[in-house]
Amino acid sequence: MLDVTLICVGKLRERFYREACDEYIKRLGAFCRISVLELPEERKGESPSKAELDACLFKEAEAIRRAVPRGAAMIALCVEGREMSSEKLSETLAGLSMNVSKLAFVIGGSDGLHGSVKDAAALRLSMSPMTFPHHLARVMVLEQLYRAFSIMNGGKYHK
């Protein structure tokens, strides 16, 4: 069974996001071993300079690299990543799982991901060219993972 780790910068505070995530985590248990790791978002001033922002993203990147399980293929969620249909995501995950037994999806905080995380990723994935709150992105990724595994297994959820 595939191990999937969702690494998220920032803590979910809103109950409705937590409940939605919990539901998809429960459903995903039929297809994979899923875990969610929350990493702290670095604090920055009200109007951070580019240097301050880069330093914060770099610190978050170090924590992300430590959190990625050894041997896992890392998938970075970022706006400049590849957009793909649910069917294509399912196909891509099936292909990755032929070579690795662990996947790590990474969602950055409100300022995104440091370039080094994106560079180290086996795949850069974009949910859409639109901007979403990073907390909503967590729900969306979990839902799409559930949909992808359902497709792989011939389930009815996708229809």
Image (cartoon, rainbow, N blue to C red):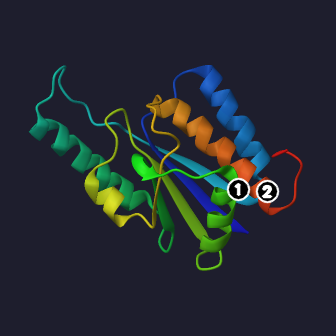
Q: Residue at x 51, y 31 (%)?
A: 135
Q: Nearer the viewer, mark 1 or mark 2?
A: 1
User: Which image quarter holds the C terminus?
Assistant: top right
Q: Residue at x 59, y 80 (%)?
A: 99
- The disc at residue 31 is none
Q: Amino acid at mark 1?
A: Glu
Whether pointer 1 and pointer 2 mark residues with C-beta atoms closer than 8 Å, the reply is yes
Q: Residue at x 30, y 52 (%)?
A: 61
Residue behind mark 2: 151
Q: Quadrant of residue 90?
A: bottom right
Front residue of 130 and 28: 130
Q: Amino acid at mark 2?
A: Ile
Q: Secondary structure at mark 1?
A: helix
Disc 1: CA contacts within 10 A as few (<14), some (14-19) or many (>=20): some
- The disc at residue 87 is 1
- Counting from the top left corner in percent of width and height, residue 55 is at 16, 44
Disc 2: CA contacts within 10 A as few (<14), some (14-19) or many (>=20): some
Q: Quadrant of residue 108?
A: top left
> CA–CA distance between discs 1 and 2?
7 Å
Q: Is residue 104 above or below residue 127?
A: below
Q: Residue at x 76, y 44 (%)?
A: 26
